[in-house]
Image: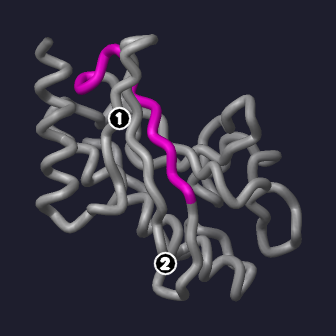
Amino acid sequence: MTQRQRLAAEHQILQNEGFTQFGVYHYATYDSYNASGTATTSSGRNYQLFCIIPPGYPTERPSLYITDPKPLLNYHGAAISGLGVSHAMHTLEPHSAGWVQICHWRSARWHAGIVLQKVFLKAMLWLEAYEQHLATGRDLADFVGTMQEAA
């Protein structure tokens, strides 16, 4: 029940903070949740984002995938999902369906105070950096910094 209330609040935060293209959805048959929507970059390109909300949310970090376009290609025309975990491209292990997983937060730095709106905000930044990668061939890491570990 606590998770349901939290996710209802998360949906409202998305709507209230101007992220109306995203929503939180409940699937009663499986009693599971996800968040998804279409991100539009400054160049006008659309990307489908799909966030799998784990049963342990909000203390467990959700996974965020780009489901369309598929395959998501790099500057050289290769599928980014083939890279797996890549610091240069800020990606984690891809989904079994071939979706690219965005590294939006380090697991060790994730905490229950982080809301889905921040996850989608980081996805928007990732997508803008991705488009710079397509234009220049430079790694995403050149455009998006990595979270520093606490000393």
Q: Which residue is mark 2?
A: 41
Q: The residue under label 2 is which amino acid type? A: Thr
Residue 13: x percent and y percent? Answer: 14, 51
Identified at 63% across, 49% down, the residue is: 67
Inspect the magenta stretch and tell me whether residue 16 lies in it.
no
* Residue 151 quadrant: top left
Residue 19: x percent and y percent? Answer: 27, 63
User: How is this picture coloured?
Assistant: one colour
Classify residue 17 as left or right of residue 101: left
Residue 65: x percent and y percent? Answer: 56, 45
Inspect the magenta stretch and tell me whether residue 57 lies in it.
yes
Out of 50 and 57, give the one closest to the viewer. 50
Q: Nearer the viewer, mark 2 or mark 1?
A: 1
Q: CA distance from mark 2 to mark 1?
A: 23 Å
Residue 79: x percent and y percent? Answer: 82, 56
The residues colored magenta run 48-59
Q: Which residue is mark 1?
A: 25
Q: Is residue 138 above or below residue 107?
A: below
| Label at residue 8 | none
Q: Is residue 87 above or below residue 50?
A: below
Identified at 16% across, 34% down, the residue is: 8
Q: Is residue 15 above or below residue 10?
A: below
Is disc 1 surrounded by few (<14), some (14 to 19) or many (20+) residues within 10 Å?
A: some
Q: Secondary structure at mark 1?
A: strand
Placement of the N terminus among the 4 image quadrants: top left
Identified at 50% across, 76% down, the residue is: 128
Classify residue 148 as left or right of residue 42: left
Identified at 18% across, 41% down, the residue is: 10
